[in-house]
Image (cartoon, rainbow, N blue to C red):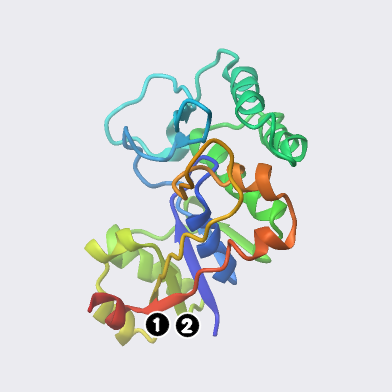
Amino acid sequence: MKTVVISQPMYFPWVGLLEQMRHADVFVHLDDAQFSKGSFFNRVKIKTAEGTPWLTVPLAETKLGQSLNETQLAKHNWRRKQLVTLRQAYSAAPHVEETLGLVESVFEIEHESLGALSAASVEALGGFFDIAPAEMQWSSAMAIEGTGSARVLAICEALGAERYVTGHGAREYLDHESFEAAGVRVEYLDYEKREYPQLHGAFTPFVSALDLAANCGRTNAMREVIASGTVYWKDFAR
């Protein structure tokens, strides 16, 4: 059953997004989605001895309604500062050097937009954990018009999807009956939020997957964390 996952690019996202990717035959970066402040497009939490602060990509001036692939990055050297922050946060983690190498592989490319940077961070994590699907697409290159649920369905149909796997936020706007009529089965992630060895106090799943990389690396422990299944939309709605 050909499975498509469509996601707005998020900056070094939490494990839950990687679990969506794990189910995908085709993963689509929705890079022409509209940018909104206070989202996860350019920021994510990390775990430190002082709590869970935001790791934020500074942006050039933004305009109302602009898309992620139109949103430009600030010019000053924020990358070096973030590497220092990550090294301090995870200095005691067993796989800190591997993780910093992963981040550096993203930073060493001059990305043209926030959409490109965040998509690259998602792909880097997928590669690190060996869960990236064979096919990656960009919505901006697909020339598919529309908005919301109708556009998501159109992308799925263009890719020959038989199953669409998504996160919980889609529940608010997805027209499930239209997907059914088109022969596309909708399933939601059943997030287990599995615990793993983590520094700095009580466990929290709501931090960047860089935390999992630093603490577990490419070990079997990692594979047991990125493991949530899915649930059919009618069962999820109940």
The residue shown at (56%, 12%) is 76
Check whether the beta carbons of the residues at disc 2 and disc 1 lie within 8 A of each other. Answer: yes
Q: Quadrant of the N terminus?
A: bottom right
Disc assigned to residue 162: 2
Question: Based on the displayed image, in which of its 4 quarters is residue 86 positioned?
Answer: top right
Q: Out of 224 and 162, give the one closest to the viewer.
A: 224
How far apart are the two marked residues, 2 and 1, measured between alpha carbons?
6 Å
Assign a secondary structure to mark 1: strand
Q: Amino acid at mark 1?
A: Arg
For label 2, count other residues whose C-alpha is less than 10 Å away and answer few (under 14), some (14-19) or many (20+): some
Give the mark, 2 or 1, whose residue is nearer the N terminus: 2
Q: Out of 14 and 203, give the one closest to the viewer.
A: 203
Q: Amino acid at mark 2?
A: Glu
The residue shown at (66%, 64%) is 223
Q: Position of residue 78 (x, y in %)?
A: 57, 18
Q: Position of residue 231 (x, y in %)?
A: 39, 78
26 displayed left or right of 67 = right
Q: Quadrant of the C terminus?
A: bottom left
Q: Position of residue 13 (x, y in %)?
A: 51, 46
- Say which residue label 1 marks: 185
- Residue 135 lies, with reference to residue 40, above or below; the image says below
